[in-house]
């Protein structure tokens, strides 16, 4: 997953692409509409690995666009993400800025999630799938998303997690 941050300090590095793991479950409401929870965790490597864990609900629409053994779908959802930037050491900076250990900070995000997927039926009940997904941060809370009163007290402000994009490949069990 690649997270993009808005309004970050110019000295703050962009989060790097990192691994993401997701679990999804759903039930069919009607033949083409499914609803269910999801759980996701991603890590953006850097000076300190930015970690995000999200739980939410998504609606999956599976119109008959392709023929078996293929299946295509789109999805929309919303979830709450807890973000965490663990404690780490900061090298001394210019203009006499002190180095040393910086404490961990956390925050929360209300996310909107959306995407497209394509699946191929291996053999009943197993499907191989790929999903291209995006997450847009809508509301932010917590000290991770508050600017420090003085830049000398901690790292440069890392910015809001405004958008994230991912490409997932996995196996699905559909009894």
Image: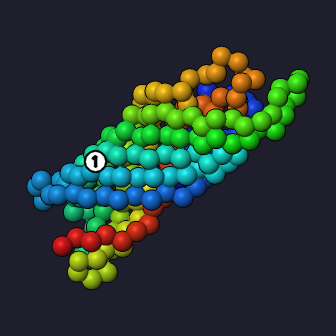
Quarter of image, res 7:
top right
Mark 1: give few (<14), some (14-19) or many (20+) Cα within 10 Å: many
Element assignment for label 1: strand
Relative placement, left or right, of 66 versus 7 is left
Residue 145 picture location, percent across and down = 54, 28
- Determine whether 32 is above or below 48 in the image: below
The residue to which callout 1 is attached is 58
Residue 167 picture location, percent across and down = 48, 58
Pick the front one: 137 or 32: 137
Residue 156 picture location, percent across and down = 70, 30
Quarter of image, res 64:
bottom left
Residue 132 picture location, percent across and down = 44, 56
Residue at coordinates 31% horizontally, 44% vertically from top-left?
56
Relative placement, left or right, of 39 versus 156 is left
Residue at coordinates 43% horizontally, 34% vertically from top-left?
109
- Determine whether 90 is above or below 39 in the image: above
Pick the front one: 123 or 72: 123
């Amino acid at each position: 997953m690649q997270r993009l941050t808005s309004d970050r300090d110019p000295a703050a590095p962009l989060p790097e692409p990192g691994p993401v793991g997701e679990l999804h479950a759903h039930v069919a409401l009607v033949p083409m509409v499914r609803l269910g929870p999801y759980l996701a965790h991603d890590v953006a490597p850097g000076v300190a690995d930015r970690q995000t864990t999200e739980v939410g609900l998504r609606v999956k629409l599976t119109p008959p666009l392709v023929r078996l053994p293929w299946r295509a779908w789109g999805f929309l959802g919303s979830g709450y993400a807890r973000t965490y930037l663990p404690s780490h050491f900061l090298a001394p900076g210019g203009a006499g800025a002190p180095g040393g250990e910086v404490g961990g900070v956390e925050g929360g995000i209300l996310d909107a999630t959306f995407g497209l997927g394509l699946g191929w039926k291996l053999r009943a009940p197993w499907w191989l799938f790929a999903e291209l997904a995006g997450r847009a941060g809508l509301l932010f809370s917590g000290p991770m998303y508050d600017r420090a009163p003085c830049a000398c007290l901690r790292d440069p402000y890392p910015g809001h997690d405004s958008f994230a994009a991912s490409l997932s490949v996995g196996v699905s069990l559909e009894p």
